Amino acid sequence: MSLKERIDQALKEAIRNKDEIAKNALRGVLTAIKNKEKELKKKLSEQDILKVLSSQVKQRRDSVEQFEKGGRDDLAQKEKAEIKILEQFLPRALDENELVQLVEQCIKEVGAKTVKDIGKVMKAIMPKVAGRADGKRVNELVRSKLTGN
């Protein structure tokens, strides 16, 4: 069963169980997937769907941060619940050690020596960590390894 089919199945189950939070989160993701398909004028691959899913989770994390700053804990909790639902469809996240090893491996692969090579390393590593690590965190690690910190 494809990722999109699994999300669709989970949506049907959420509707049956009258789970409003899951229903809203899954509908939002399916809408984002459909919009991306219309934009690209093609069916999305599993990798593309993972990117859409990751961006949806990232948007919700940003929202949580903003809601907490604004003192809207009720909305922050709703977003956190949606994040948990969406994360079920993402591959297992890389732990810090795995991420560090992957960064070091990619730095060696592309022969990066200085901070100017960050772009090369990021281009090589992002497809490998798609949906399993935050791009901002990956960039921080690459930068620290190349500056020697």
Image (tube, rainbow, N blue to C red):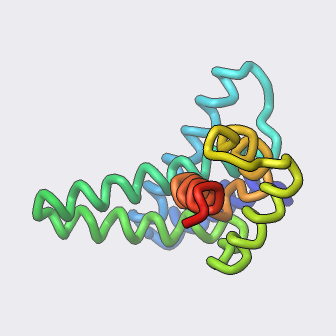
Left or right of 16? Residue 20 is: left
Can you say whether 34 is above or below 103 in the image?
A: above
Name which quarter of the figure residue 145 lies in: bottom right
Q: Depth check: give the residue in front, 143 or 63.
A: 143
Name which quarter of the figure residue 97 lies in: bottom right
Q: Depth check: give the residue in front, 51 or 106.
A: 106
- Estimate the x, y position of residue 82 in percent, counting from the top left: 44, 64
Q: Which quarter of the rendering shows the C terminus?
A: bottom right
Q: Depth check: give the residue in front, 70 or 75.
A: 70
The residue positioned 56% from the left and 63% from the top of the image is 86
Left or right of 32? Residue 8 is: right
Q: Depth check: give the residue in front, 42 or 99.
A: 99
- Estimate the x, y position of residue 136 in percent, counting from the top left: 52, 53
The residue positioned 75% from the left and 40% from the top of the image is 120
Q: From this viewpoint, is residue 134 visible?
A: no
Can you say whether 19 is above or below 26 in the image?
A: below
The residue positioned 62% from the left and 77% from the top of the image is 96
The residue positioned 21% from the left and 58% from the top of the image is 67
Q: Which quarter of the rendering shows the N terminus?
A: bottom right
Q: From this viewpoint, is residue 25 visible?
A: yes
Most distant residue in the left direction: 71
- Estimate the x, y position of residue 110 in percent, counting from the top left: 85, 47
- Estimate the x, y position of residue 29 in percent, counting from the top left: 55, 48
Name which quarter of the figure residue 134 lies in: bottom right
Can you say whether 141 is above or below 109 in the image?
A: below
Number of numbered discs overlaid on the protein picture? 0
